[in-house]
Amino acid sequence: MATGPFSLNFHLISPKARFQGTFALAYQMEVNLRSLYLELADGIGIQRYKKLFQTMARFEDKHIYSLTSHYPEGKVAEKEVLQPDSVIEGGMQLRELPDEILEQLENPQKILSFCLAIESQAFDFYSRLANRCRDDQARDFFFDMADEEKAHLILLTNEMDSFLANQY
């Protein structure tokens, strides 16, 4: 479950924002998280979790496609290098570079917990944005994004269940 005050990361978007105004933020968060997942996949030695990070990156590709299909003229340039303090999906600030994150992910349970934390925060963030938006199109879009995050959480929860079942 995501933690923090209800207003966490609300500074990123105005409640009066229209879909066009929310697009660049959502797009960049998705691109940044996709880049992070791909860099983590490249750096991890456990094949099963390399594939998991690649799957998570493909989920972000779908979000990016969804965004550009709703608002293709608003596409912003993707960052070439993921930097500390980049905003990733869910409004989380990336405080460390992917190599530093990998050092902390020394076992499958920590890897899955890391992914669950990101996706849980994203679900929470998109749900709260949807409830805060006054523009119908933006609100509907954020509810759709929150629903997609639920699917990611189900996949990760099943993976965690499988891992834990094999530990005992």
Image: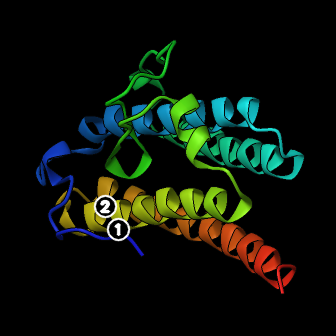
SS class of the residue under badge 2? helix
Q: Which residue is mark 1?
A: 127
Residue 60 sits in quarter: top right
Q: Is residue 71 visible?
A: yes
- Considering the image in quadrants, where does the C terminus appear? bottom right
Q: Is residue 165 left or right of residue 143?
A: right
- Total numbered labels placed on residues in the image: 2
* Residue depicted at x 71% and y 45%: 53
In-front residue for pair 102/116? 102
Q: Amino acid at mark 2?
A: Arg
Question: Identity of the amino acid at label 1?
Answer: Ser
Label 2 packing within 10 angstroms: few (<14), some (14-19), many (20+): many
Residue occupied by mark 2: 139
Q: Position of residue 61 (x, y in %)?
A: 64, 38
Could you say where residue 25 lies in the image, as x and y percent from the top left?
32, 36
Instruction: Give the mark, 2 or 1, whose residue is nearer the N terminus.
Output: 1
User: In terms of depth relative to the viewer, which is nearer, 25 or 41?
Assistant: 41
- The spot of residue 40 in percent (x, y) is 66, 36
Reply above or below: 145 against 45: below
Numbered disc 1: secondary structure = helix
Is residue 65 shown to the viewer in this render? no
User: Which residue is found at the position 37% from the left and 27% from the top?
Assistant: 84
- The quarter of the picture where the N terminus appears is bottom left
Q: Nearer the viewer, mark 2 or mark 1?
A: 1
Tell me the residue at 76%/80% (across/down). Answer: 164
Residue positioned 34% across, 47% down in the render? 92
In the image, taking residue 16 as reference, residue 121 lies left or right, namely: right
C-alpha gap between disc 2 and disc 1: 9 Å
